[in-house]
Amino acid sequence: MRHGDGREETLRITETRRTIGSRGDIRAHGYGVEPHHAELLFRDGIVGVRDLGTEGGTWIDGRRMPRRVLRPGRSFRIGATRFQLIGFADAAAPQSNEMDDLDTRLLDVRGGAGGARVTQLPTSPLAPPIVDASAVERARPVPARRPQPATPPAPSRGARKIEPPARVVVAEADPNNQRWLVAAIGGECWRATTRAEVLAHLSHLKRLVVVVGYQLLDGPASALVEALQASEYAPKVSLILSAGVAPEFDDAYYRLTPGVPAEVLQRVVASATRPRPASNELAPSDTRAWHDMQVFEICAAASAHADPVAAAQAVEEGVAKLMNAGRVSCVFHDASAGAVWTETGESPIEGSAATGIVGYVARTAEPVHAAAVGNDPRYDAQLDNPDGSPSDGLFAVPIAARGEVHAVIVVRRPGALGVFDPKTCYRLVHLAQELGPIFARVSAAVTAEDALAQRQRPKAMSIYRPEAVDHYLDKGEEGEVIRIAPHWTATMYWALLAMLVIGVIGVAVGTISEYSAGPAVIRQDGRAEVAAVGAGAVASVDVQPGQRVTTGQILARLRDVTQRAEYEAIRNDFRTQLRNRLLDPNDEAAASAVVSLRRQLHAAEAALEQRVVRAPHDGVVTDIKVDPGQQIGVGDAVMAVVDDKAKGLEIIAFLPGGDRPLIEPGMALRLELAGFDYAYQEVEVDTVTDGVIGPAEARRILGPQLADTLPMDGGGVIMVRATLPTTTFESDGKVYPYHDGMGGTAEVRTRDETILEMLIPALKELSL
């Protein structure tokens, strides 16, 4: 075992199975190594390695393979760790031809030996259960056989991770039904006759499909369903139930009906075991999520351009940020002409795909990573790294789709910065795969444009056939400009005349109302915001929301360690001097000290009182805004106390000051709450301020909590108050409660005038 840093270890394998991974029995490290990446299997003198369906894969003799039997001298790699089988210490190694034959049938030692696979299906469908207690008692547990999993497809770099296919367990104690189920499935599966055997498989599997029969040795099949549903492995299990088993269970994958054909069961099991993509739920801080977002942004920027030059420029800018590289080129490739070229950048590239690293990538669609580009025998300075140095590092990946390379992304950086790390290379490969379809569509659009530009056929672009146009011109006759039928012109005349009469009547009779509108807010009458008179950290909150309090009751306390210590010291000094004054009435120094300390004591008591928040009046506590330990300043709101004798909710609206002469108490006010369009509340105006106030004074009236919630311009406003008759309102058929601080728009109708007076203002003077 050789680590990436050069350290070597010698391992002696005596167990039948050992896992390899970042958390396995044998620790391997490097980029892409998963906690349980692969496993070593040792049995009957045969050593094998098997990949556990990982994304990074297991590389054996330089090739990615799902499993392989190892002969002495054969090596494999996981991440940055390389393993090589040295030899067999205590057993004779098998012959090489035996090893090759075992490559395709490497056993999994955990499952034990099982029965042979059934290749011929019975002709009879699944029969109803045979209730025969003696037959069930005589049945013997069939050892579960762990089958060989199908070789999972090797995921390409950048592809979404695919969850491996599920394993199948047939849970049935009746031998006849069990044989039919196994034969109908038509694939390798485990056999279980007890609940314990089924639950034992769940501890080391990611997914399991359980085909439940009618009876188990330790109880009915419904008991197995209940046990699986109650276990922690329930999300990993797909249940296929026989007819009548656990009818109340709604989460079954499929239910078999009496007489179901074998091929139906086979297809259902195949569907349940099919690999499925893993969940893509990533936290925003996850590195992969950030990488995927960057790839999406680059693809979105490229797909927004139909021009290939603009698309290439967007890719170059995005890759420069993604790879943190200074020089990026998007090199176009024409497979039919065998040419490569660039349309952007300060150093243009133009040449043949038959030379250079860029040409190799364009021809083979294989990425190339060169630590020092000058050491690569394929290097062409003009094509691969113009204006660069032979010591520069280079990484080139193809943008391919539909079997054709449309472009090559080339990233270069100075050799002093070292080679590109594997994570960086993976990002660019992933991006190139996503860009393939985009460049394929751009290439198709450019090809179509060229084809249309080369074909000059103006007549073919007309909606009329050329033969029809020629025939019309040969006749030499000119048709009517417009043909008017008298029967519909008379009808249209009277229709237009009626519309004109209706319009004139509407202008003469219809009225238009003028409204004074402005922002409004709902306030709780009798609500008092309790603010802190001192600054500091909150020591305790002595009340709960909804608690009734009395005037002067302590609501919260601030930390007062310093103030209380100062108060105690002054009080002790005051008592000492007062005692001296009483013992010697003629002691003038003690008398003067008593007077001074009394003033200091009053000041200390006032400072200590500032660390206490009290209720301003009787009421109910609401909106507690602080928690113990929170730092607050002078004037910060702590909570609110609502007077329970208050009238209720009211509307405070701020209307333009110029409308003050037009607004009086008793007029109708219409409120539209923000977020509830066309849900109007009709109330009457209670009071209107006599004078006009400025926006600053209006914000002072609202208080610091709501001062910034209402938009106000620089002009003067008047404050209008109205009482809400109810505590709820209706919108879209639903009833909602009002809450203190809800904002909206208030309107008061100030005057009405006809449409005719609005169009002709002189008519107002005649009416007067």
Image (tube, grey):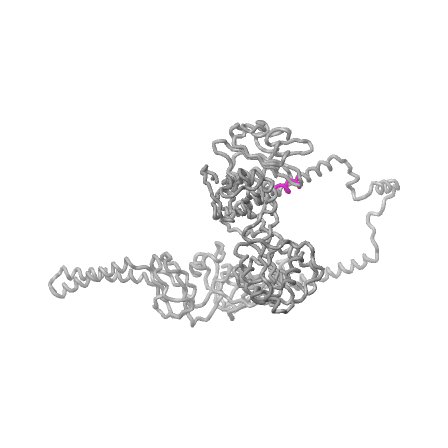
Residue 260, horizontal then vertical, whole percent: 69, 62
* Residue farthest toward the bottom in the current orientation of the protein: 645
At x 34%, y 57%, the residue is 536
Q: Residue 21 in the image: state x and y as whole percent.
A: 50, 46
Q: Would you say 125 lies left or right of 618 here?
A: right
Majority secondary structure in the magenta region: helix
Quadrant of the image occupied by residue 373: top right
Residue 440, magenta (yes or no): yes
Asked whether residue 179 is drawn in magenta, I would say no
Quadrant of the image occupied by residue 552: bottom left
> Relative to the observer, which residue lies in front, 187 or 433?
187
Q: Write the start and end of the magenta stretch as one range.
A: 435-442
Q: Could you tell me which residue is drawn at 38 percent across and 61 percent down?
A: 531
The correct choice, above or below, for 51 with respect to 135 in the image is: above
On the image, the x and y values in percent for residue 332 come to 63, 34
Number of labels in the image equals 0
Q: Camera-side residue: 334 or 690?
A: 334
**Visible residue check, residue 768:** no
**Percent position of residue 345, x then y:** 57, 32
Can see residue 758?
A: yes
Q: Judge whether 404 appears above or below 221 on screen.
A: above
- Looking at the figure, which quarter contains the C terminus? bottom right
Give the camera-side residue of 407 and 83: 83
